[in-house]
Amino acid sequence: MKRALLALLLAVSAPLAQAAPATDAQVDRLLEVMRARQTLDTMLPQIEASQRQVMAQMTAGQVLTDQQRALLDRIAVRNAQTLREALTWEKLAPMYRDIYRQTFDAQDMESMIDFYGSPAGQRVIEKMPQAAQHT
């Protein structure tokens, strides 16, 4: 009876023991092969362009004075500066690390590193912006 109970406890605890937490090194490697930093760098100009487009749509058909136009330009510059300060890699990387560590275990991380590090994974990364545009 004791052996059966011990065997049952070992069987139940085995999956828990295998789920090792992801390490910072694994997360950093995944972010590297996923080109997370480069993706952020390419997103910022797109976000700024989108903000300019929204401002243009908001003022479409309106006759603006030079003073109003200058004010809008200053607002756009300030928004872009705030965005660039808030979305630096140095500020976002720790958040990415925490999110990935909380969500994925070490085995998940290794699988994703293997996939995104492969030629097929790199093609997925290259085509994701197109997929997002189509969405």
Image (cartoon, rainbow, N blue to C red):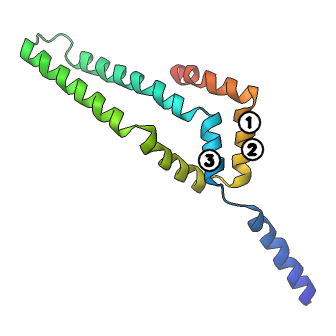
1 and 3 marks in contact (CB < 8 Å)? no
Kindly identify which residue carries mark 1. 115
Q: What residue type is labelled 2?
A: Ser
- The image quadrant of residue 101 is bottom right
Q: What residue type is labelled 1?
A: Phe
Distance, label 3 to label 2, CA atoms, is 12 Å
Numbered label attached to residue 27: 3
On the image, the x and y values in percent for residue 45 come to 40, 22
Residue at 26% over, 16% down: 57
Residue at 73% over, 46% down: 110
Residue nearest the viewer, comparing 86 with 105: 86
Residue nearest the viewer, comparing 109 with 54: 109
Helix or strand or loop: what does disc 1 sit on?
helix
Residue nearest the viewer, comparing 63 with 35: 35
Residue at 64% over, 41% down: 30
Q: Which amino acid does label 3 sit on?
A: Val
Helix or strand or loop: what does disc 2 sit on?
helix
Kindly identify which residue carries mark 2. 111
Mark 2 closeness class: few <14, some 14–19, many ≥20 residues within 10 Å: few
Q: Is residue 94 found left or right of 1 in the rendered image?
A: left
On the image, the x and y values in percent for residue 5 come to 86, 84
